[in-house]
Image (cartoon, helix red, strand yellow):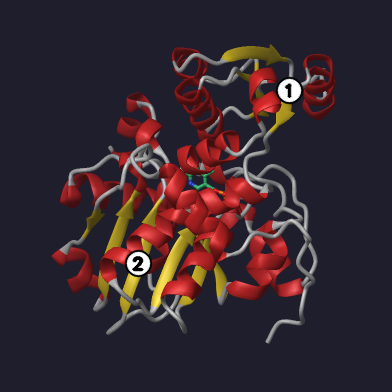
Amino acid sequence: MNAITPLTAAAPTFADVRRAASVLEGVARRTPVMTSRTADARTGATIFFKCENFQRMGAFKFRGAYFAIASLPAEAKARGALAFSSGNHAQGMALAGQLLGVPVTILMPKDAPAAKIEATRGYGAEVILFDRYAQDREALARQLASERGMTLIPPFDHPDILAGQGTAALELLEETGPLDMLFVCLGGGGLLSGCALAAHALSPGIAVIGVEPEAGDDGRQSFLSGQIVRIGVPKTIADGAQTAALGEITFPLIRRDVADIVTVSDAELVEAMRFFAERMKMVVEPTGCLSAAAVFNARLPVAGKRVGVIVSGGNVDLASFARLVA
Ligand SMILES: *Cc1c(COP(=O)(O)O)cnc(C)c1O
C-alpha cells in the first residue's frame, strides 16, 4: 500500500473529465474500440483496444490540447498559446488552435524530423526553431510567452490537458461497461492519470496499469519510491515516452489511482507493431504499442479478465515503420 502523496491544488477530478468530454463532443473523433480473437486466444483475456491512432492528427494528444485551449479566457485566446514539443503535443496544439481560431506557436528543435515540422506548420501553427544544444528551451519559451503575452501549455502537467486525455478512457468504458484492468501508455502521465480518474468513476475496483519503456522506467521508480525520480533522456524507440520525469500534478494522482507500473522492451514494442499491422490492419507508432506489449507479454496475469488497452497513437513515418517491422 502506498503512503499518501498529497495532491496538488490543481489536481482535476472526474467532473473535469466529464466537462472535457462535453467540450470535445463533435470535435474529437470518438475512436473505435476494436477486438481481436487472436489477441484473446493468445492471452486468455477479453481485450478491448481503444484505438487513438485513429484520433484526429493521429494521437490522443488532440483531446487535451483542444480542451486546454478552449478553456482559456477570451483575452488569453486572442494573444495565443505556446508549446514546446517535437511530437504529438505540437500537432495536437496546432490543430486545436486552428479549429478554435487561436494563434499557436510551437518551439521545436532545429533537428526535429522535417515531416513533423511540416505537419505542425500544415495545421497552421507558427514554428520557431531553436538549437537544443545551445539554447535553453524553457527560458526561450518563457521569454516568448512574456514578450507576446502567450499562454504556455505543457504536454502533460496541466489540469485541462490531463482531464482531456481522460476522455479516451471515459469513451472506452461507456462502450464496454466495467473492466477488470486498464493498461495505459506512460510518458509524463497525462494520459495515465486522466484515464485513471475516468476508470475509477465508471468501473469501481478496476486496476489501472501504466506501461513504460524499459529504458525509461522513471515512472516505475517514482511510483515505488514515493518521490519523483528524474532520469536522463531514455534511449528507446518509444519517442512519445522519452520523458525524464512525471509531473507535479500527474504524480500524486498516479500514486493514488494506479495499481502498478510495468515496463516493456523495444523488441516487444516492435512485435506489437507487427501484430497490429498484420492482424488488425493498423499502423501504431512504437509508443502507442506500450500498453498492448505489456498485455501480450503477460507482465501481469490477465487470463480470464476483461482488459482495456489504450492504443495511444499512430504517428510514425513510413520509412521507420517499414524498417522496424521488416
Ligand atoms: C504523449 C504520448 C504518450 C505519453 O503520454 P503522457 O501523457 O506524456 O504520459 C503516449 N503515447 C503517445 C502516442 C503519445 O504521443
**Tag 2: amino acid:** Leu
Q: Which residue is mark 1?
A: 150
On the rendered image, what quadrant is the C terminus found in?
Answer: top left
Q: Which one is earlier in the sequence, the residue at label 2 or at label 1?
A: 1
Query: Is 83 placed left or right of 182 in the picture?
Result: right
Task: Using the rendered image of the protein, determine whether residue 213 is visible from the camera's viewpoint.
Answer: no
List x then y, in percent, for residue 166.
49, 56
Mark number, residue 125: none
User: In terms of image quadrants, where is residue 72?
Assistant: top right
Residue 11 percent location from the top left of the image? 70, 60
Q: State whether residue 321 appears in this view.
A: yes
Residue 158 place in picture, x, y as percent:
68, 47
> Is 325 placed left or right of 114 in the picture?
left
Instruction: Tell which of 300 and 72 is nearer to you.
Output: 72
Farthest residue, direction left? 37
Which element carries disc 1, helix, strand or loop? loop
Q: In terms of depth relative to the viewer, which is nearer, 136 or 26?
A: 26
Give coordinates of residue 147: x percent, y percent: 83, 15
Numbered tag placed on residue 173 in the rendering: 2
Crowd band around label 1 with a 10 angstrom C-alpha radius: few (<14), some (14–19), many (20+): many
Amino acid type assigned to the residue bearing label 1 in the image:
Met
Q: Which image quarter: residue 303?
A: bottom left
Picture residue at 42% right of the left edge, 73% below the top:
202
In the visual, does 157 lie left or right of 97?
Answer: right
> Is residue 325 shown above or below 98?
below
Secondary structure at badge 2 equals helix
Q: Is residue 261 above or below residue 22?
A: below
Q: In percent of the image, x 18 and y 62: which residue is there?
A: 36
- The residue most toward the bottom is 1
Residue in the image at 53% along x and 41% along y: 67
Asked if the beta carbon under badge 1 is closer than 8 A to the nearest atom of ligand 1, the reply is no
- The answer to whether the residue labelled 2 contacts the one labelled 1, judged by CB atoms less than 8 Å apart, is no
